[in-house]
Structures are given as structure tokens and as C-alpha cells.
Image (cartoon, rainbow, N blue to C red):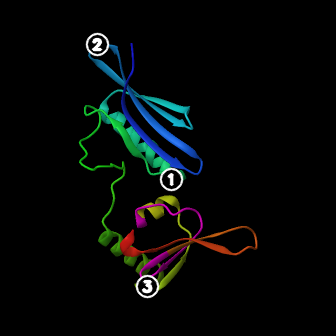
Amino acid sequence: MSAQLVERWEGAAKGGRYQIDVLRFEPRPGREFFDIRLMRDAKQYGSTVARSPAEARDRVQHAVDWALSYGPAPYKRTYRDAKLAPVVRDSEPLLTAQANRFELAARLALFLVARTGDRLAKWQGTLLAAEQRALFGRFFGKGTLTIDGTRERIKHTVTRSFGMGREVTADVAWSDL
């Protein structure tokens, strides 16, 4: 019984290089299973078995969502087999769907109205990774977010160290998200 590589997803973050391998194997002729292996810096830290291509896709999606909630690691598919993977027409497919910029701008305006009562106000605070991904379509990281409705900009700042001040890590227009 040999395993065949069906799909490989790769991503890199501050913690290291992450990789998801999906292997197809047949314990009996005509009955295929999929082994999803999670690796960090070429060392395997998790493995699950799926009984169908749909279940394998769900498990890969779950692994990528978990990794994205941990840190900003955009995964790219570097290898795929058409029997398992859905048809993707992008040149560099990402596993998560990208929202268009007008939807994101409208979502930010509604967020400001909900938090401050005015679309042209300024809000400053912190958001969880899942909230940032739902609101901005990406994860900025830990730190303080400033959403300015008049300038239509988002600023992300982090404290360098105790008493050393703040460092701006991102200053992005709503239309550039």
C-alpha cells in the first residue's frame, strides 16, 4: 500500500514554515482514504485520516483557518491533483475567499456606526483575529487598531517594549484592503 501526494499547501509566518500535505492511499482496491499531514519546519506535528475528497477538503480548510487564527500565514497551493481539489482558475489560488473592496468599505462604515454612532468618527481598540479577518479580510496582528472614518484609513500600532512608545506597523486605506 503506497501513498500518493495529492495536494500540498505551504505558508510561512514568524514562527516558521508551515506545510499541509494530503496523501491518497488505498488499503483495498477501489477504497481510497486521505492522510492530511500538518508540518512545521519539516517536522510533522499532526495527522488525520479522511474517508472522502470532500472530508479531506474540509479538514484542510479547518487546518488553514486554525493557522490563520494563530498568525498571518497565507497558504498557497503548490501542488494539486484534480480528483481531490476543486477547479480553481486563479494563477495563485488562496484557500480563503477574498472579499471585494466595496464590501469591506461598507462593512467598516457599518462597524463605525455600530461602535460610535457615526460613520465619520474615529474608533480605537483591539480586535480578535477572527474579528479582524471578518471585518478587514485579513489579520493585522496583536496591537491597537485605529479606524478613521473621515480619512477612510486603518492604522495598526504595537508597543515596542515597556515605556518605549508605539510603532506603526500598518497604515492602509479602506480601498487598499
The local secondary structure at tag 2 comes to loop
Q: Amino acid at mark 3?
A: Arg
Neighbour tally class for label 3: few under 14, some 14-19, many 20 plus, Cα within 10 Å: few
Residue corresponding to mark 1: 69
Observer-nearest of 1 and 28 = 1
Neighbour tally class for label 1: few under 14, some 14-19, many 20 plus, Cα within 10 Å: some
Observer-nearest of 134 and 21 = 21
Mark 2 or 1, nearer chain start: 2
Residue 1 magenta:
no
Q: Quadrant of residue 150?
A: bottom left
**Residue at image location 51% in from the left, 47% down from the top:** 12
Q: Position of residue 69 (x, y in %)?
A: 50, 53
Q: Position of residue 4 (x, y in %)?
A: 36, 23
The local secondary structure at tag 3 comes to loop
**Residue at image location 49% in from the left, 30% down from the top:** 47
How far apart are labels 2 and 1 at the CA level? 39 Å
Disc on res. 158: none
Residue corresponding to mark 2: 29
Magenta-highlighted residues: 135-154
Q: Is residue 87 above or below residue 145?
A: above
Residue 151 magenta:
yes
Q: Nearer the viewer, mark 3 or mark 2?
A: 3
Q: Quadrant of residue 77?
A: top left
